Amino acid sequence: MNFKERIDKYKKKPLRSKISDVIFIIFIVAMLTPSGRLAIGGFVNRIKAVIVQPSVNTGKEIVILKSADYNWQISDINGRPVNFSEFRNKVIFLNFWATWCPPCVGEMPAIQDLYNSFKSEEDVSFLLVTNDSPDKVREFLKKRDYNFPVYIYSYNPPNIFKSSVIPTTFIISKDGKILVKETGAANWNGTEIQNLIKKLIKE
């Protein structure tokens, strides 16, 4: 079959088939660039984040932070040193993430919504922690219009927070109980998490 015959045959294909071909080509081209891969990965994980509900630890599953676990030096994106111990006796939402991580990007709209719900609560602290550069983080937040608090870490976190996977998210009670430890993208603005934080505020 020569080239002209191939073209004529393609013209006879149904419109739906042609649209599918175009979408597939756009997908392949997008996957060739880092920004395209991040966008597609973020979209896929955003769908996943709507479906996956974080699980709450109970009974023997609950781990309690020791005093040494609070001694962890981080800094805000303006370079101001902050010690994790400053957030002790508060409800803590702690999320480890990176700007290049599609699951992290996918769950961030829900995290922003959760932050919007509790940002005025003095007894709740949000810490989204990364080891990306402050400039990269600022650009990321500005582009997506996020305003949750981001911190940079240079020193490894305490062992109790270490994970080989990002994102990893913890919800910690005022008395240091890790009630949620979730890896991967999840829906952080669901009713269960909203109710859990409201309950922990009152304790």
Image (cartoon, rainbow, N blue to C red):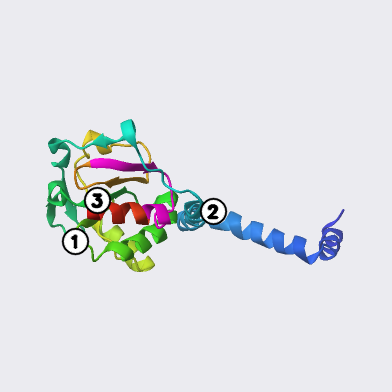
- Residue at disc 3, secondary structure: strand
Do labels 1 and 2 touch, CB within 8 Å? no
- Residue 97 rendering spot, x and y as whole percentages: 34, 49
- At label 1, counting other C-alpha atoms closer than 10 Å, the crowd grade (few under 14, some 14-19, many 20 or more) is few
Left or right: residue 5 versus residue 25 is right
Q: Disc 3 or 2, which lies upstream in sequence? A: 2
Q: Which residue is mark 2?
A: 31
Amino acid type assigned to the residue bearing label 1 in the image: Glu
Q: CA distance from mark 3 to mark 1?
A: 11 Å
Q: Residue 17: percent from the left, percent from the top? A: 76, 60
Q: Secondary structure at mark 2?
A: helix
Residue furthest toward the top?
A: 60
The crowding category of the residue bearing disc 3, from other C-alpha atoms within 10 Å (few below 14, some 14 to 19, many at least 20), is many
- Work out whether residue 66 can be spotted: yes
In magenta, the rendered stretch is 177-193
| Badge nearest the viewer, 3 or 2 | 3
Q: Earlier in the sequence, mark 3 or mark 1?
A: 3
- Per the rendering, the mark at residue 122 is 1
Q: In the picture, residue 179 is in which quadrant?
A: top left
Residue closest to the eye, 101 or 91? 91
Q: Residue at x 35, y 68 (%)?
A: 145
Residue type, numbered disc 3: Ile
The residue indicated by pointer 3 is 92
Residue at 33 percent of width and 68 percent of height:
142
The one of 203 and 44 positioned closer to us in this rendering: 203
- What residue is drawn where x is 36% and y is 56%? 194
- Residue 41, percent from left and from top: 49, 52
